[in-house]
Image: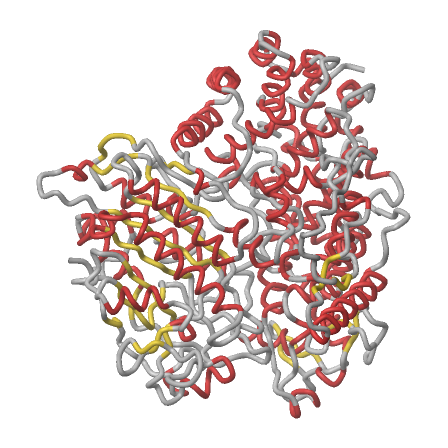
Amino acid sequence: MARDPQGALIALNRFGFGARGGASGDIVNAASDPRGFVKAELARPNAALLELPGLQSTTELGQAMFAYQLEVKTAREAALKTPGLVPVEAPPAAMDRKPEAPAMTGNTTMTVQPDAPKPPPAVALPPNVVQKTYRAEALARIQRATITEGGFVERLVVFWSNHFCISASKGDPARMWAGSFEREAIRPYVLGKFADMLKAVEQHPAMLFFLDNQQSIGPNSKAGERGKRGLNENLAREIMELHTLGVGGGYTQADVTSLARIITGWTFAGREGKIGTPGSFAFNANAHEPGPQQLLGKTYDDTGVAQGEAALADLARHPSAATFIARKFAQHFVADAPPPALLARLEGVFKKTDGDLKALALALLDSSEAWQMPMAKLRTPYEYLISTGRLLARIPEDPGRYFAGLQTLGQPLWTPPGPNGFPDGNAAWAVPEGMKLRLDLAAQVSSRIPDSIDPREMLDVVAGEAASSETRQTIARAETRQQALTLLLMSPEFQRR
Amino acid sequence: MDCCESRMLGPTRRSLLLSGAAFAAWAYLPKFARAADARDPRLIVVILRGALDGLATVAPLGDPDYAGLHGSIALAKDGPNAAIALDSFFGMHPAMPEFARMYGDKKAAVVHAVATSYRERSHFDGQDVLESGYAGPGRVQSGWLNRAIEALPRGERVSSGLAIGPTTPLVLRGAAPTVGWAPVNLPNAADDTAMRLMQLYQDRDPALATALSQGLKLDKIAVGDEMKPKGGGNAVAAMRQVARGAAKLMAADDGPRIAALAFDGWDTHAQEGGPVGRLAQLLGGLDGALAEFESGLGPHWRDTVVVVATEFGRTAKINGTAGTDHGTGTIALLAGGAIKGGRVIADWPGLANGKLYESRDLAPTTDLRAIFKGVLHDHLGISERALAEQVFPDSALVKPAKGLVG
C-alpha cells in the first residue's frame, strides 16, 4: 500500500493527540492508511468508557462529600467550643504529595527547645476528599489520553465535555463531580445519540449544581407557595443557547422562562436523602411548577419529570440543533471557518440519523475536506501538553504539572471561564502571550530530559516524511538536545493540526 | 510552576477570576502623547464579563420600588453596611469606598440605566456587541477600542505592555497591533532558542512568527517583583494585583497609553448577596483595582480615564434563589483625574411595573456607545465622523456624550 505521510500527520494531529514516542510506530501505521487508522478506534466496543478501580460513581462520591462536609463542620464546631483548640487540616494522603517535595529522611532530627512556646492543641480535620477525588479523576483522564492509540475517541470526549462544560470552580460539588460527570454523562454517548447525552447531562447532579437548577422552585409548586425561593432560569437558558439550539436558534425569553418552569424539581438528593438516594438525580415533585407549559409553540402537559424529558427530546431533534452542532463539530476538528459543503453534509447526517454521533464522526472522517483543509488550527493547551507527554512516552503518576501547565496557558482543567466552555479557535490561542508561554513551557519540559533522547529521531516519530526540511535542519543544528527538543515541541509540525 | 498549582487549588472564586482576567495594550504610543500642550492621556477600558447587577452596585435608594424588587439583597440607607450616599437618590455599594472617595473628589462618575444596543440576554452575544462596537453580535472579529486606536496618529512603539491571561479581549483585537504579558512564574526559554524558533517560524509559519515576536518583546520589559503572582490572597487581592502590574507598566514614559482589562465572574444567578456576600467581594476587588490604578499611575492619573462596562444588567426583581437573572439596563463607571465627576449621569426611567423593560429589567435610557464615544472624542480627540463610521459603525444617531472629560 502506498504511504501517505501528510495523511498520517492529519490522522494523528487533527483527529488525535499526536504520535506516541518509543516503539509505537504510530506515524508509520497511520501513513499506510490514515483514514482506516482513525476509524479503527471507533470500531472498538466501549472505546470511550473510563472505568478504573478507585473511580467511584457520582452517587458514591456525593455521599463521601456530604460525609466530609459534615465531619469538617463537626470538627470546626468542636474547636470553637474548646478555647485554644485550632482546626488543622490532616496531612495529605500519599498521592496528594508533590513528587518534587523533599522526602523526610531518617537523617532529619527534631530538636526540642525547652523554652519554645508549645503550639496550641490541634483538632484534626479530615483529609480533603474533594481535592483528592479531583486529582484522581484528572490523573485517570490524562493517563488515558497519554496511552490511547491515536486519540480520536478521547478528542471526541474532550470536545463534548467542553460543549456541555461545567466548571470545577463553582464549588465543592462541581469539583467533586467534574470527573464522574464526564465519565457518566459524556463518555457513554460520544458514539451514541445526542439526545441521550443531552438527557444524561441535564439530569446530572454536576450540571444541576453548576447552573443552579437545584435551587430553582416553581412559583406555584407546593414548595414555592410556602417557601421563599422561586424560579432560576440559568440552566434553561444555557440548555437552549449553548447546549442545543445555539443563540439565534429561534427561541425567545418566554421560551427560556417556560423551559425553566418545565425543569423545576430537577435536582439531586442531599445528605439526608429526603427525596432520593443521597448524591443522585432526583425529581422533587414538591418544587415542580404544576400545569402545562408552552415551549417553542408546543404544549407540554405536566407529566412530572417526563415533561422536561419530552422537551429535551424535542430540543435535540430541532433543526437549529443540527446546524449548531454540525458547525461547532467541524470548527473544532477541521477549520475555524469550515467549508459550507462540509457543514451541509454534517448537518444532513445529524438530521437523518436523529443525532447519531458516531454517524456524525464517520461523516467527518469520510469527507474529503477533513483531509484536504490545511493544518491551520493551533493545538489547544490541553492537546499540546498531552501530545508532549505522549511523545516523551511519559505516563504521569501525578497531575500536578499538568494542572500548572494548563493554568499557565489559560486552559485550567475542567475550569472554563463560563458555561460556553473554552474558546475553540486561533483567535484565542495563537496570540503573543500564549505563544511565548508555550515556548517557556517547552523549554522547561526539555530541561528535564535525559541525554539518551535524540530529538532528530523524535521528529521522525512526530511527522515522519511530512516534516519540512527547515524544521529538520533547525533541530539538527540545535546546540543541545534540550534546545532541539524545545524547537521540536514548538515546530509547526507539532503545534498545528 | 508550583505557584500556579496552588492558585488553581485555592478557593473557588479566586481561580475563576485569575483564569478569566485578561489585560492587553496598544503596541504604540499615540503621536500626540508628547505634543506641545503637554497632555498625555491614558485610557483603560475594564470589561466586567458575566453581566454586573447595576441596581446592586449603584442602588436607586430613592426609587419607591427598589427595595421591594431587590428584596433580601437590596442595599439600605441606614444600618450596618449602609450604602454610601452619592446624592439624595443613589447610594454606592459599601464594598466600593475608594470609588466613592473619588466620586466625592469629583474624579469619578456613574452612568445609570445604560445599555448597549443589544436587547437579547445571551452573555456571549452581549459581550460581542459590547466589545465589537457593532449594533449586533457576530459581525466582526475586531473591537471598538482597536478601531479607535487606528484613527490615532501612531508614534513610537511602546516598550512595555502587559497581559494577564494569555488572550486579548475582543474589545482590543483587530488590525492595530497589541501587546500583552502574563505574570506567571515560569522561567524564560533561552534567547538563543527563541531566536532559532523565530527563524523557523519566519520560514514556515509567518502567523506564529508575528505572534511569538510580540510575545517575546513584551516579556523582556515586564519585570519587577510586584508583578509576579504571589501565593495566597483572594479575589480582591488578585484583582488588585492585575491592576497594580498594569499601572506600573502604563506609568512608564514609554509604556502603553491605551489598554483593556477584563474580569470574569459577575453572573450572580444565585445567592448574590447584598451589602456583604458574593457580589460584594467582587466589587471590593474592582474597587481595589481602581485604587491601584490611581496610586500606580502617580502623576499620570491626572490625565487618565478608566471606563468600566458590562454586557448587560440583571433582572430588577430578584429571582427565586436570592440572585438575579439576565437583564438589560445597568451601570457604567468612569474614574480618573480627567473625569468631570461627582455626579450620577442618568435619565432615570423608574422601576415601577409599567416602566420596566419587558416587565422585568431596568429600562435603558442611555446608549453605552454615547459614553464610549464621548470619552474617545474628548479624551483622545477622535473625530465624531470616525466614531460614527469606523469605531461604532452605523451609530451616527448616537451622539457622543458631552462634558464627561475635562
User: In the image shown, does A441 or A207 lie closer to the viewer?
Assistant: A441
The colour style of the image is secondary structure
In the rendered image, the residue lying farthest to the left is B36
**Labels in figure, total:** 0
Is residue A377 found left or right of A107 in the rendered image? Answer: left
Is the N terminus of chain A in the top left, top right, bottom left or bottom right quadrant? top right
Note whether B74 is above or below B36 in the view shown: below
Q: Compared to A72, does A33 lie above or below? A: above
Q: Is residue A346 visible?
A: yes
> In the displayed structure, would residue B261 be above or below residue B199?
below
Comparing B85 with B395, the one in front is B85
Q: Which residue is depicted at the point 34% across and 77% down? A: B91
Residue A448, percent across and down? Answer: 68, 23
Determine whether, in the image, residue B290 is placed left or right of residue A314.
left
Question: Which residue: 25% across, 71% down?
Answer: B345
On screen, A306 above or below A105? below
Q: Position of residue B372 (x, y in %)?
A: 28, 57
Q: Position of residue B240 (x, y in %)?
A: 43, 53
